[in-house]
Image (tube, rainbow, N blue to C red):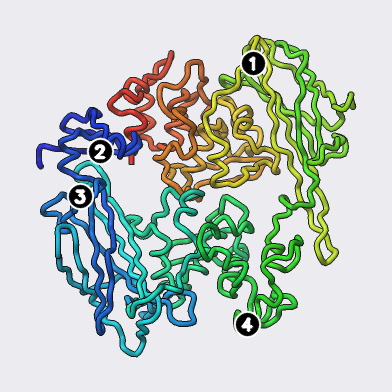
Amino acid sequence: MKGIQFRYRLAPIAVLTVGMLLAVSGDGEKKQRYSSNQKEFYLDDKPLAFIRPGLTIEIQKAEVSGDTARVTFRISDDKGAPLDRTGVATPGAVSLNFVLARIKKGDRQYTAYTTRMQPNPTTGRLFLQATQDSGGAYSSSAEGVYTYTFGTKIPAADYDATVTHTVGIYATRDLQEFGLKTYIANAVYDFVPAGGLITVVRDIVRTENCNTTCHDPLAVHGEGARREVRLCVLCHTPQTTDHVTGNTVDMKVMIHKIHRGKNLPSVRAGTPYLIEDEDFSEIGFPRDIRNCEVCHDKGTQSKNYLTAPARDSCGACHDDVNFATGEKHGLGGVQVSDAQCTVCHAPETGREFDISIKGSHVIPDRSSQLPGVNFEILSVDGATPGSNPTVTFKVTDKKGNLLEPSKMGRLRLGLGGPTNDSVFHTREDARQAPAGQGAFSYKFTASIPANATGTYVVAAEGWNDVRLTKVDGTTVTGRDTGLNKLFYFGVTDRTPVKRRTIVSQTKCNACHEKLLVHSQTRDSVEYCSVCHRPGFTDDSERPANKRPAEAMDFKNMIHKIHTGRNLENEFTIYDAGEAENFNGVRFPGDRRNCSKCHEGTSYQLPLPKGLLASLTPRGFFSPTPPTATACLACHDRLSTAAHAFVNIAPFGESCATCHAEDSEFAVTKVHAR
């Protein structure tokens, strides 16, 4: 259909333009199927009806006859209508790949039938790898319904018709020529060739758990065509070895190592963790790796890490333990099998810091022994322009007992504002606050700016370091951190006005579980923006020979940190004279999904009036107005900066002219997936 033309321009921001009308139609059915962050949403009815976007696979049956395996499946679009896999009768050929594996009697993992021998590129040594089938043939019994006959033959000597067999299919449908995307579908089907119930499965980690925590979505290998964990485990088996490094890519080993990444004992000792040419040594898991339930949840066998510990999986994270020699295995010594693991390592005993699985993975900072730290700000008095306000507050433990500020490891009160866009922030040590009637009062030595207007905020932060008792009588330190408590008060506002909600704390914690930074004193993104204001840079912390300073405004810093390895330019922040580079950060989601972090329409244009330009000494120009600051943090190419610059006047930005939600290049539309 040559009359339909789609193209992309204004790199690196992908902008969808269509030679035909792309006004959103009144098709209620379409709006139910697609949202404004999907490219299909912006297509008119006629091109949408022709292109028929989407890809779904439904496996109907699988069988083994003699030495031949077959699978019958149906492919369809988003409306459930059948597709032509060749792309002749319907747009976009469907590329299909097939894997066949079984769980042998007595095993807990798959062994694939579909394998290959892959040579090492240097030595030529051959390594066995599970892979997709090749040499198979298709037949069709109905529109959209196909039977694939595997090219791989089933070996008679290694075939048991009574065990669980699984067929996996991963497929792609490329509709990029129509301005859409490559659609991906995975399907997995269990069967027993001899008939009967399936009694053995592999269901340790569920894809939904990966996707609801960090990945958006889980997508690996090439175009990201493998998206289901149940598909992954058909190839990532103990039989499969990386032909470049010789490392196993067995799922239970590889995934633990990837997620521990830079904190692997081997990596810390100087040995990088590589699969083929990909270095995972820079991976920083956004949670505490000791929280096994982050991944081991929702599956019928997710508790296997508790009930069936094994040397390979445990030794993947603890890769400085040598079970063959007993090195660093303590009293456990040499272990030649997994049979004795549970003798010492019970699932859980109810005690912390013992050698049970649960007990040995207790995170000290979340120990039940911690008495707790809770802040409550009762009032702020004397808060006028140029004044030194007094804050009345309480600090209690989780039983409600009053804690003495002077005995805390840290207790600070932060003061800043105004809330529409912060220009002032200070923190002071409040541990010497004199006692009051069941509360404490602290008068700031710093003054609210004489020209202050609007609403300001006070926040409490602090912790106690607590010695926790282990089962063996030794102790470990746990940091008992109080969550930031914010209190808004008017300086010139009669009624305090809170800062607008931009980023959701809940969404941050979906990945980070409990976001805690700066010596574990800051947990609130609402509070972060008070300090990380438009005029804030790391100038006071950065060595003179490393200047100019880096912008620390939240909308610049957070976008850059999460863009990480996809940045065009270096991004390094100095804190206390120490450099921290973020160019190695791998964001596990899709940054086009602004709603992954943002609340509501907070990422859309136009931004609220009255926001301040940011100091960006290392940027292409400084100061940078608010919209350009946010956008250029991710899209940090020279060409994009030039585009922004020519659309900025001394009295404001014109970004919303083209990028407002009702415009041709709306933020939501250009980020649509």
**Residue 610 sits above or below residue 486 on the image:** above
N-terminal of the two: label 3 or label 2?
2
Q: How far across and down, in percent of the image, does residue 438 sit?
A: 87, 27
Closer to the camera in the image, 111 or 561: 111
SS at mark 4 in the image: loop
Residue 81 is labelled as 3
SS at mark 1 in the image: loop
Q: How crowded is mark 2: few (under 14 residues within 10 Å), some or many (20 or more)?
A: some
N-terminal of the two: label 2 or label 1?
2
N-terminal of the two: label 2 or label 4?
2
Q: What residue type is labelled 3?
A: Ala
Q: How far across and down, in percent of the image, does residue 373 sit?
A: 77, 40
Q: How far across and down, in percent of the image, does residue 32 sit?
A: 31, 36
Do tag 3 and tag 1 residues touch (Cβ < 8 Å)? no
Front tag of 3 and 2:
3
Q: In this view, does 470 lie to the left or right of 630?
A: right
Residue at label 1? 496
Residue 324 is labelled as 4
Can the viewer see residue 306 in this picture?
A: yes
Residue 8 is labelled as 2
- Identified at 51% across, 33% down, the residue is 556
Q: What residue type is labelled 2?
A: Tyr
Q: Residues within 10 Å of mark 1 (few under 14, many from 20)?
A: some
